[in-house]
Amino acid sequence: MVEPRRILEGPDVKLIVAIIKGFRKKPTWDAIVAKARKKGLPFKLRAIQRQPLVKAAYESKVADIRSCREDRAARHSEGGRPCSRADTKDLLSEYEARITDLTNQNAQLAEQLHWLRQRCRRENIEVAEINRPLAFPRVREQS
């Protein structure tokens, strides 16, 4: 007995679109068909390629991967070794400014930690047990 042909419709198209979105690298049509067959979809390559939602999902996935690759390439091209002494001096001055900023930030955080520890001692709370903000002390009104 011959099985009736299954028509590629809504839920099947959504499943194929989800398969395409699940790829981490650029999907190939053969890989999409193979994954669809593993999910129990008996459709051929041409039937899958004819669906406009599937085409749109494939093209958007390829565009996303292309933009990610371009971003990664741009980040890697920015890094690297400086080419001249002037570039080295510029890079060194940037690093010194960054070190200064981080040192100042570290000093502020150390001061905040100091005051937090003092408040914890006053409230009889262990510093490691803090999982809620401490209540602000009430200001006494002068009469």
Image (spheres, rainbow, N blue to C red):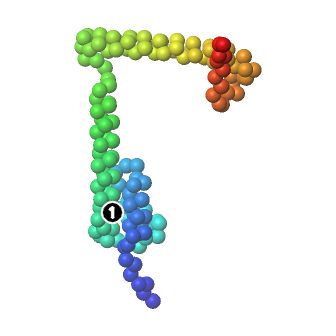
Side of 52 relative to 17 (left or right): left
What residue occupies the far bottom of the structure in this picture? 1
Q: Nearer the viewer, residue 96 or 124?
A: 124
Q: Position of residue 50 (x, y in %)?
A: 28, 68
Side of 113 relative to 65 (left or right): right
Q: Nearer the viewer, residue 9 or 133?
A: 133
Side of 35 relative to 111 (left or right): left
Image quadrant assignment for residue 56: bottom left
Q: Nearer the viewer, residue 51 or 80?
A: 51
Figure quadrant of the N terminus: bottom left
Q: Please tell me how many numbered marks the rendered image carries.
A: 1
Q: Position of residue 140 (x, y in %)?
A: 66, 16
Secondary structure beneath disc 1? helix
When the figure is inspected, residue 90 is found, relative to residue 71, above or below; the finding is: above
When the figure is inspected, residue 26 is found, relative to residue 100, above or below; the finding is: below
Residue at 29 percent of width and 49 percent of height = 63
Residue at 40 percent of width and 15 percent of height = 98
Side of 129 relative to 50 (left or right): right
When the figure is inspected, residue 75 is found, relative to residue 39, above or below; the finding is: above
Q: Position of residue 132 (x, y in %)?
A: 65, 30
When the figure is inspected, residue 78 is found, relative to residue 64, above or below; the finding is: above
According to the picture, the residue beneath numbered tag 1 turns out to be 54
Image quadrant assignment for residue 127: top right
Q: Position of residue 118 (x, y in %)?
A: 67, 14
Type of amino acid at the residue the image marks with label 1: Val
Image quadrant assignment for residue 101: top left
The answer, for residue 103, to whether it is visible in the render is yes
Residue at 33 percent of width and 36 percent of height = 72
